[in-house]
Amino acid sequence: MSEELAGLALAGEAGLPLYGVRPNGLRALLAHLPGATAQAGLVEFSAETGQILRLENAALVGLGTAPALHGFGAAAMGLPANSVWHLAGDGFDYEEAALGFMLGAYLYDVFKPRRRAPARLSRQNVSERTKTVTSAIFFARSLINAPPNHLGPSELAQAAMDLAARHGAQAERVSGNNVFTRYPALAAVGAGSSRPPEVAILQWQGSQADGRSPLISLCGKGVCFDTGGYDLKPSAAMLRMKKDMGGAAIVLGLSAAIMSLNLPVRLILRIGCVENSISGHSMRPSDILQTRSGLTVEIGNTDAEGRLVLCDLLSEACEEKPDWLIDAATLTGAARAALGPNLPALFCTDDAMAAALLHAGNATHDPLWRLPLYEPYESWLDSKIADLNNVSSKPFAGAIIAALFLKRFVSKQISWAHIDTYAWNDTSSPGQPEGGEAQTLRALLAAIEQFSASRQRNALL
């Protein structure tokens, strides 16, 4: 897959030097490049993030004060089409720069050809790890960008099956009546659609892993389109609801990276593939649903469906007693209201796990922000006729309430993290083209790598 990556030069193509430069190093660099000072003055190049200065036999990309990832993200589409470059200069991390360049070359062009080809980066700068991470992110982005008539529950489940086949993983596809038996709440969400719900399960173990290696369990919300059900969304709010399977796409991409890197872990992935539609079979407000855990749920709002998809997956995952249980979901608008579109919310039952995830997010420039599982709000989910409601009657703390709902389905001894993500770029910025985005994938991958390495070290003591 990496051989076909946009932005990657052919073998043997070295290309021209591409210098990354920050404002405080600009004058010194220009002095060493013939004619560069005059050219920079003509175009008012000041080395701000994403600025590009094209010279006769070289180019400069501004890094500003941002991570190199962001500055180099502008290069693939800011330099001439099909031109080839190699990284030059100092003061930045080459691995990070290469990843930024590659991520900036992405475009979802399945139904409309590219207007122009991206520039390409020499293979000498692009490590196997960078190619692996780039491939995983492109995979997740393209799933999110796929139009809903081309990516329904069946197609999303098949994407997981294909991923399993590529890596020799065990795979199970749960469909038909088995979904209603094993995942009754999830099945109720998808009951209104002519495209029936499915659950895809993938199991894999690294070649260096054994029974003592950490068991990582991933769950993803895969609502391929969300009308809101009988609590119908307004038309403007429905325009981006193809991205409501963003959580599933992120954990699929993360799983692809884990397996490609052959991390010493045991991995179990579950994605709930459904469409929240409207028909005579749809769940209704005031319905009472059974869940896999045995808890009953009153439906206060049919548009709070993602937590119903995840609750059954989390219950089943807990039966295997994973070391880390992580779910990702485009769950609430409240998280976006609190943190904006670029900062996913993290909820976690384990402070050490949370610290590891936050540290990895900062280190990879793929940040998260922790919000509290504030227990006094749990009573807001009380129902008079069921064990709990799927929404609160109060108009506050929507992201926390959703997380507290999920927490009811997670065993107390399990280290669990819930990520409420937007999974989308509203506008294009360097390395982050408008459309689907694999937010937190790099952070989760780095944290899992560190966790597994720590477990290996401890096993040797």
Image (cartoon, helix red, strand yellow):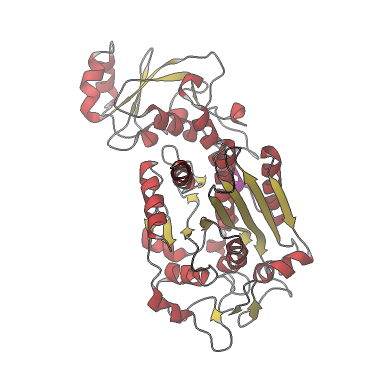
Q: Residue at x 78, y 63 (%)?
A: 176
Residue 172 versus residue 52: which sits nearer the camera? 172
Q: Which residue is drawn at 64% across and 81% down?
A: 287
Query: Total marks drawn?
Result: 0
Q: Would you say residue 147 is visible in this rendering?
A: yes
Q: Which residue is drawn at 53% across and 63% down?
A: 237
| Residue 279 on image: x %, y % | 72, 72
Please tell me whether residue 291 belongs to the stretch shown in magenta: no
| Residue 444 on image: x %, y % | 47, 48
Q: Would you say residue 340 is visible in this rendering?
A: no
Q: Which residue is drawn at 71% across and 62% down?
A: 197
| Residue 238 on image: x %, y % | 57, 61
When the figure is inspected, residue 322 is found, relative to residue 266, above or below; the finding is below
Region of the chain picked out in magenta, as a range: 142-148
Please tell me whether residue 147 belongs to the stretch shown in magenta: yes
Residue 219 versus residue 440: which sits nearer the camera? 219
Q: In which quarter of the image is residue 336?
A: bottom left
